[in-house]
Each structure stands twice: as C-alpha cells, then as structure tokens.
Image (spheres, grey):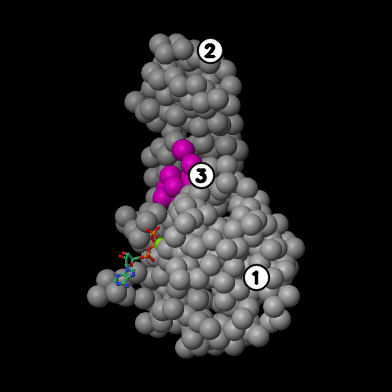
Amino acid sequence: MNKILIDLKNINKTYDGQMVLDDLNLYIRENEFLTLLGPSGCGKTTTLRILGGFEMPDTGKVIFDGTDITKLPPNKRQLNTVFQKYALFTHMTIAENIAFGLKIKNKSQSYIDDKIKYALKLVNLDGYEKRMPDSLSGGQQQRIAIARAIVNEPKVLLLDEPLGALDLKLRQDMQYELIRLKNELGITFIYVTHDQEEALTMSDTIVVMNQGYIQQIGTPEKIYNEPENAFVADFIGDSNIISSIMIEDKLVDILGTRFPCVDTGFGCNKPVDVVIRPEDVILSDPGCGKINGVVTHLIFKGVHYEMEVTAAGYEWLVHSTSMFPVGTKVGINVDPFNIQIMNKPASEDEEAVGINE
Ligand SMILES: Nc1ncnc2c1ncn2[C@@H]1O[C@H](COP(=O)(O)OP(=O)(O)OP(=O)(O)O)[C@@H](O)[C@H]1O
Ligand SMILES: [Mg+2]
C-alpha cells in the first residue's frame, strides 16, 4: 500500500461563529484518487482550500510528506488547484493561460509549446491556442483550467467540481481522461463533487461529508454496499431505509416480519435502520414471498423497470428487469446478505466515522 502523503489532523474551521469543519481527520495516500462527496454547504470546498493553502484552519494541522505545511502559502506547496469557479486570465490567450505557470518556472519555449499542444489535445481543444477565454463556452473554459493545472505536473491535483459545467458525454470522456492521467503521471487526486455517480466511478476512496462532519470513508464498493448510517445510504443512490428491530444476531424484524440476515453484534431487541437496495428486492407471486404487497407505480427506466410496491404499510422501491403492472399482487423477498443493518443515530447530526484502511 502506498505511503501516506497528506494528513489532515483535527481540523476545525468556523466562519462568523458558525462551525464549518468539526474536528476533521483524514489522510490521503500517494497516487490515491480520493473524492470528497456531500451535499451543498457541507464543507468540501473549505477542506480543499485548507489543503491548497488558501485558507487557514482555526486549529489543526496539514501534514505533507511528514512536514507541517499548515502555514505554507499556496505557491510553496506541491499542489495545484482547479477551482469550482475557474479563473482564467481574461486578457491572455488560451496558450498564454496554459503557459503561465511554466513561464514562471523558466521553461524553454519549445518545452512550453509541446506542453500546450499536449494539454489541449488531452482536453479535446486542439487548435484553440490563439482564442481568448471570453470566446469559449463555460465547459470549454473549465477544460482549459484543467489543462493549465496539468501542465505543471503537480504531485497533487485538487479539483473542485471540475466537470460540473460539462454535458454528460463530455463529462464521461473527461472522467476517463482524468483517471488515465492519474495512472500515467502518478499524480494524487483530491476531487470534490456532489455527484454520487461520478464519485463511485472515479474514486479509490470516497469521503462522505455532511455538515462539516465525515460520515464515512471507504472504497466505492464499501460505501455503496455497506453504508454506515442512513445519511450515507440515502445520499449514495436510491434505497429502502426501514426502521426495524434487531431480534438477535442474524435475525431482524422488518415491518412485523422476521427476516434472516448476516449481521451480528447489534444486541437483542434493538431498534436499527435497515437498508435494502431497490435492485435487491425480489418480487414473486403473492404468498411466495415473506411479505405480500401490491404494485402502485411503474416506470420504464431503460435498463430496468422501477416500481413502487406497497407492503406492510411501507412504499418499497424496486428495480427489476421483469415488469409487474400497477395493481399486480406480489410477494417480497430479500436475500439475507442484501439486508444491511445500521445503528440508529443517537441524534440527527451524529457523527459516524469510518477509517480508510
Ligand atoms: N468565506 C466564507 N465566509 C463565511 N462563510 C463561508 C465562507 N466560505 C464558506 N462559508 C460557509 O461554509 C459552509 C461550507 O462551505 P463550502 O464552500 O465548503 O461548501 P461546499 O461543500 O463546497 O458546498 P457546494 O457543494 O455548494 O460547493 C457553508 O455554509 C458556507 O456558507
Ligand atoms: Mg464547493
């Protein structure tokens, strides 16, 4: 496993007396693609700005490769940032924009010309050298901002929602390009998005944040399949989150019916939250499932049908490649290993911390 490159230790940040980051602890390994994921206002950009040196934490430390860089200015850090609001120099051509950092480093003109060509090709904008930023669309400007950061070959690239302005096809192309860059150049990526699908596709590690707290840290598979609390489960894709009672190890009461499950260690007769993904709800003939219900909604989604099934007083969200028309009586089954048990939070904004090992 690669060594730890960046370590954020006990970071606190308030604005006007309001807590924005609350004792944030996070480390990032060399060559890792780590994504900060969470709803608007949860503190993603603030975390990135502290990493980049554009903001000082109230307390806590930023350690880079073993050295405390908390007070080091941005230009002295081996990091490059692509901001949420791309800031191109409007009085310079695209080529001059991309060349800016390299000129400061006194690189030769032929080196710079090669780099500009390479970077423009990479972001699919060959031939745009002489254009001015104002003459580019928002998405094109954002791609220039990425090109400008990449030519500096930083050790770490901080990207704040860099693909937000792009259309779906281009966004997918750029996702692929960014992953390729990471692998080719060995750069460590710290990426910010509020798009869970983007986070799941691109990341080695996902950090789910809410209201200045880290809710869970893990691989995309872990976050998706084993969310640690209802917030994570709800934020990462569609879910059935059902208030239930853990009867004993490997047995849970869901809506008055006992389901075998695989989880242990939750105690006896304890209130828990159960997460069941819509694709894991198995529909059968009525009487052949554990609970009986009736289909109340049906939408064709292309790859699958999305249905709502009312059963035991709960609206179950179901994804299936089989179609059950509205009004069909069905049975509901769930395999034990597709029932994910979570502790109920003690309070609304309780912190649930995972460890990225
Ligand atoms: N300079 C500032 N002064 C005062 N409050 C700020 C400042 N910067 C950020 N905040 C507040 O801190 C909180 C976190 O902001 P931040 O920009 O980190 O959120 P975010 O997760 O990046 O959200 P988004 O997805 O909308 O970009 C917000 O409530 C925001 O209003
Ligand atoms: Mg932001």
Q: Nearer the viewer, mark 3 or mark 2?
A: 3
Q: Quadrant of residue 38?
A: bottom left
Q: Circle 3 sits on which residue?
A: 167
Quarter of the rendered image showing ligand 2: bottom left
Q: Mark 1 or mark 2, which is nearer the start of the sequence?
A: 1
The residue indicated by pointer 2 is: 285
Amino acid type, label 3: Asp
- Spatial CA distance of label 3 from label 2 is 42 Å
In what element is the residue under mark 3?
Answer: loop
| Nearer to me, 308 or 98 | 98
Q: Quadrant of residue 153?
A: bottom right
Question: Which is nearer the N-term, disc 1 or disc 3?
Answer: 1
Q: Position of residue 120 (x, y in %)?
A: 64, 60
175 and 265: which is toward the camera? 175
Residue 168 at x, y percent in the picture: 53, 42
The magenta span reads 230-239
The image shows residue 203 at horizontal and vertical percentages of 61, 56
Res. 39 in view: yes
* Disc 1 Cβ-to-ligand 2 distance below 8 Å: no
The C terminus: image quadrant: bottom right
- The local crowd at label 3, few if under 14, some if 14 to 19, many if 20 or more residues have their Cα within 10 Å, is few
Give the residue at mark 1: 151
The answer to whether residue 355 is magenta is no
Q: Is residue 233 magenta?
A: yes
What is the distance, in whole Å, between disc 2 and disc 1 at their CAs? 60 Å
Q: Look at the numbered disc 1 and give the secondary structure of its residue.
A: loop
Q: Tell me residue 48's x, y (percent).
A: 47, 70
Q: Amino acid at mark 2?
A: Asp
Q: Pointer 1 and pointer 3: residues touching (CB < 8 Å)?
A: no
Q: Main secondary structure of the magenta part?
A: helix
Amino acid at dot 1: Val
At 52% from the left and 54% from the top, the residue drawn is: 140
